[in-house]
Amino acid sequence: MQIHQYENNGLKILLDVPSGSVHVVDDIVYDAVTVMQETADKAEIRRRLTREYEAKEVEEVLAELDELKAAGMLFTDDEFRPAIESFANRKTVVKALCLHIAHDCNLACEYCFAEEGEYHGRRALMSYETGKKALDYVVANSGSRTNIEVDFFGGEPLMNWQVVKDLVAYGRSLEKENNKNFRFTLTTNGVLLNDEIMDFCNKEMDNVVMSIDGRKEVHDRMRPFRNGKSSYDLIMPKFQKFAAQRRELGLKYYVRGTYTHYNLDFAADVLHMADMGFDQISVEPVVAPPEEPYAIRPEDVDILIEQYDLLAKEMLKREKEGRGFNFFHFMIDLEGGPCVYKRLSGCGSGTEYLAVTPWGDLYPCHQFVGMEDFLLGNVDEGVKRTDLVNTFKTCNVYAKEECSKCFARFYCSGGCAANSYNFTGKINDVYEIGCRLQRKRIECAIMLKAARAEDHTEE
């Protein structure tokens, strides 16, 4: 059993970690739970609480807490841990591909893990034939699963636009006879975006991810053209038009940015994008070697935590003013939540999710592309490194000591295997800075849900 207690935006919040139950409580309940986590001795609990509260009030609160415990909403046992061995040995199917349609890019983003699209290798565009083999592979290896996710990724995928269109058509031709439904996504920097591409995406793309970092000076510092000139002025109006179209049509999109050591006040970038008309926003911390000048440093974390709190409060304010927007990292489901597998293992990299290079090589995810130790196979022969697949199957929240004790484990699902490898040399470890920021994001997300519920109750 585990309960996480914290205060945020004037609310005292209890999260029963195993059950996912959230309680907004008053001072006496909060203090009672604090004591109960330290001792199970009822006499000691009463003795400590009656120092500050009336005995009658203490008895009422303890009775209420016993009722919540009996209802499975507080002090619950972790039902997932006993099943972890069978989970690690589960049979998996491939349900998502990241198609590296272009290992090339028309921007020179300083923080790009893909090295301007090259991924530690050569510039290349995926051929239609290779893409067809990738789609055939995922259909053949997706088992009885109906929905298949395919992300056109880069580099910049619009540099290979005709092949994107041709592969979408080919994917559609496979759906009926194989009982599959392709949900295509495009991730783009927007440089080549035009009306024809927008129209096609509005017909065929389940989601579109538009890369922009926020304020002009922030964006242009890290995402310039190769000649050093601004890309913000070109892409912003295109993205505004594209987002407005998809919003009007009820289609999914989000703008995605990256913050660095250079813009620790990243909340201002989120709010800038909201002010520019975007209502689906994601801004994430850069993940970079510590020697890079733009890398997030341990001493930056406290500043960033304050920024998340500031952002959450501003979001509540804007919602009340009718100017609300979604921030990707504050979006969690407290009712249903992710399925058990996703709670325990996250994105499924290396098992259910694979990246495909322009020449058809298979890797656990886009961040492992180019690391030969993680080459799984290719679209012609399939996955050959079943030992690696089995290793990735062991990536779960109980395989990592830090995760097994963390209140956020069922929301972050153990974090990113690639980040763990890049910072510790092991896929089953954790990236400490990322963990601290993730815990704060989850606290803010729960606070937002709680505050909205409180406001609804008061109406």
Image (cartoon, rainbow, N blue to C red):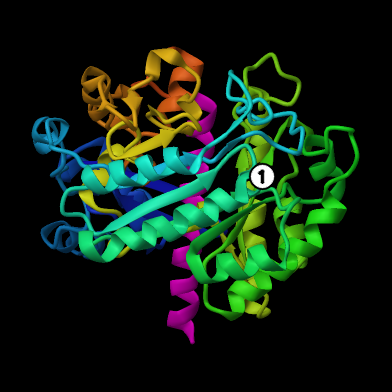
209 within the magenta span: no
Residue at point 27%, 20% (across, down): 388
- Where is residue 450 drawn, in percent x and y? 44, 65
The residue stretch that appears in magenta:
431-459
In this view, the residue in front, 294 or 103, is: 103
445 within the magenta span: yes
Q: Name the residue under label 1.
A: 159
What type of secondary structure mainly makes up the magenta span?
Answer: helix
Q: What is the secondary structure assignment of the residue under circle 1?
A: helix
**Residue 120 image-quadrant placement:** top right
Quadrant assignment for the N terminus: top left
State the count of labels: 1
Residue at point 71%, 53% (across, down): 190
Toward the bottom, the furthest residue is: 459
The amino acid sitting under disc 1 is Met
In this view, the residue in front, 117 or 342, is: 117
- Where is residue 337 drawn, in percent x and y? 30, 57
Q: From this viewpoint, is residue 406 visible?
A: yes
Q: From this viewpoint, is residue 445 visible?
A: no
- Where is residue 27 drawn, in percent x and y? 42, 58
Task: Using a 10 Å C-alpha cutoff, classify the residue at mark 1 as few (fewer than 14 neighbours), some (14 to 19) or many (20 or more).
Answer: many
In this view, the residue in front, 181 or 176, is: 176
Q: Is residue 203 above or below residue 236?
A: below
Residue at point 37%, 36% (across, down): 354
